[in-house]
Amino acid sequence: MCAAILVSLSSPALADPARTLDAVQVTASRVERPVGETLASVTVLTREDIEASQAPDLIDLLARQAGVDVARTGGPGSASTVFLRGGNAPHTLVLVDGVRVSSTGQGVFDFAHLPLEQIERIEIVRGPRAAIWGSDAIAGVIHVFTRDPSQASVRVLGGSYGRVGASAAGGFGDGDHGLGVTAGWQRLRGFSATNASSWAFDPDDDGYRNRNLSLRGRTALGNQRLAFQALATDADVEFDQGDTRARNRSAGLTLGGALGARWTHQLGLGHAREDLDTVSGFSNSFRSRRTSLDWVNTLAVGEAGKLNLGVNWQDEEGVSANVFDGQTFSRNRSSRAAFAGYGTRFGRQLLDASVRHDHSNQFGGAGTASLAWGWAPSDAVLLRLGWGEGFRAPNFNELYYPDTGFGFAGNPDLRPERSETWEAGLAWTPAAGHRLDLSAYRGRVRDLVAFAAPGTNNAININRARMDGAELEYRFSGAAWNWGGNLAWLDAEDEATGLALLRRARHKAHADLGYRFGNGLAVSIDGDYVSSRRDVGGNPGAYAIAHLRLAWPLGEAWRLEARVENLTDRDYTVVQGFNTPGRSGLLSVVWNGKP
């Protein structure tokens, strides 16, 4: 497996070469652009990539990508944290169909409850995007697009740890009108989330249940298009000291189209909510609400230029209740922003520039900017340089969480975190089906929020952090063979203490090798290596694990999928004090109707 890791690919094996290597992204600059012409480090995972990966869940799929670290506290459904390029979890902006979905309380989104069966594509943009998207986009953006089913499909699965589930998708329509729905359900008996090294250890199994539903529709109104998307997930998570119920809802309504020969626009209304209830010795609940309105206008300038002009309004609310001591808080804030971006190509050079100003009634104003330049000395090579600023407004827990005598307490005088990042990159397509991406970056964050006020447990702006790193990705997609992977190096340090940032690996790699036989049978093996990480209560050691998967077509409409996780039954630790699955299997039967 070590030899395979040195080859490396972030795109799952057996995906279509054209879709994998020539995908179009919209997140990096809010303008559609092929990945090969984008002046940012971008990974696009299509629906075909997701199905080919046979990943058991979204957390597992994200963990395979370059520059992404994942910390999961137990099995599927357990609390999971995603770190992008060494940044803290709230430094990644998370969007679902263009709608912000991170909790107003903790400032993060728990990817564990968003099933892969609900996802059409994922765009991962590494590096600051605050000048385009505003607060939180210090380390990057993860943008999830829900399913838009053009054909009926059904999946039934079963596997180790009492895992059973089913999902179905269907829709109808034409180019101008359409309606689609996707629904799913899954249950696991699970295994004990903690081990004997945890203070909360209980050897019982910790189960998980998830129910989910999404709806999408569109219709043409003259030269305008009206579209809506809605997603709902209900999850019940067992852990050793209690149970948590997480209910997430997001919805968006957009109207867009041409307003002139060289002018297009999109007006979008979005809403996201999270209801989180935990029953334990420290029972608590939190209600998160966010409503936003965006209007983005794109004007063609000259032969190759595009000018983006936009405005944004957002209202946030957070309500917290600690049942065990009766302390609560209820807060809200609003913000507005204006932004502009310009991208063009002249000869073999490309240029992107963006500026944005956000103003909040809670922390005042924040201005950000970004600039990127690219040069294509040949059709196969693109060199790029980039610089960008970022900021993050403190979340409601950091600002207002009551002092219960346990853990931490909020501080309403916190300032926003600020960042600056430089990046250089190379994209090379030496031949059809091949692509190599190399990136190096240097980031600095100041006014980091830490719960370390002298003599108290209050949050204060005390820390500075640096995140320096490099990423290498290589992909080959052919008719029969597919291989590749990624390598990542990261030096992420809290400059106030000189210590490495928690739960971020210095070295990380993923490799994937697959072959499709003439009868359609596809066999693939993939593996991951993660170096030792600093953690609370100990430093988990380095580990390498491998997985095997098969996909066998049973006629035109049916397919059988099988995956073996942790093929060698390796005992390893991701988060100190928490268990990971041993050798386990997952079997799925899939039916796809005609488009």
Image (tube, helix red, strand yellow):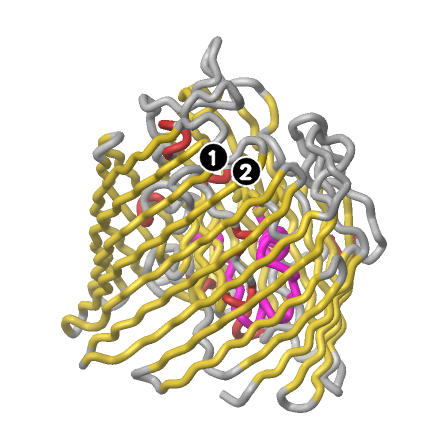
Magenta extent: 40-67
Question: How many labels sit on residues?
Answer: 2
**Residue name at image x 48 percent, y 9 percent:** 455
Q: Position of residue 572 (x, y in %)?
A: 78, 43
Which amino acid type corresponds to the residue marked 1 in the rendered image?
Answer: Gly
**Residue name at image x 35 percent, y 81 percent:** 178
| Residue 179, quarter of the rendered image | bottom left
Task: Answer left or right for 161 relative to 283.
Answer: right
**Closest to the observer, 534 or 565:** 565
**Closest to the observer, 41 or 461:** 461
**Residue name at image x 37 percent, y 33 percent:** 396
**Residue name at image x 69 percent, y 73 percent:** 588
Residue 387 in sight here: no
CB within 8 Å, label 1 to label 2: yes
Of callouts 1 and 2, the N-terminal one = 2
Give the labeled residue for mark 1.
443
Q: Position of residue 127 (x, y in %)?
A: 45, 45
Question: Residue 86, labelled with which disc?
Answer: 2
For mark 1, does the 10 Å Cα neighbourhood hold few (<14), some (14 to 19), or many (20 or more) residues? many
Please, what secondary structure does the residue beneath circle 2 have? loop
Residue lying at the far right in this picture: please name it: 568
Q: Position of residue 61 (x, y in %)?
A: 61, 57
Question: Residue 282, labelled with which disc?
Answer: none
Task: Answer left or right for 553 relative to 94.
Answer: right
Task: Answer left or right for 391 relative to 535.
Answer: left
Q: Nearer the viewer, mark 1 or mark 2?
A: 2
| Residue 131, quarter of the rendered image | top left
Q: Is residue 317 above or below residue 172?
A: above
Quarter of the N terminus within the rendering: bottom right
41 in magenta: yes
Which amino acid type corresponds to the residue marked 2 in the rendered image?
Answer: Gly
Residue lying at the far top in this picture: please name it: 455
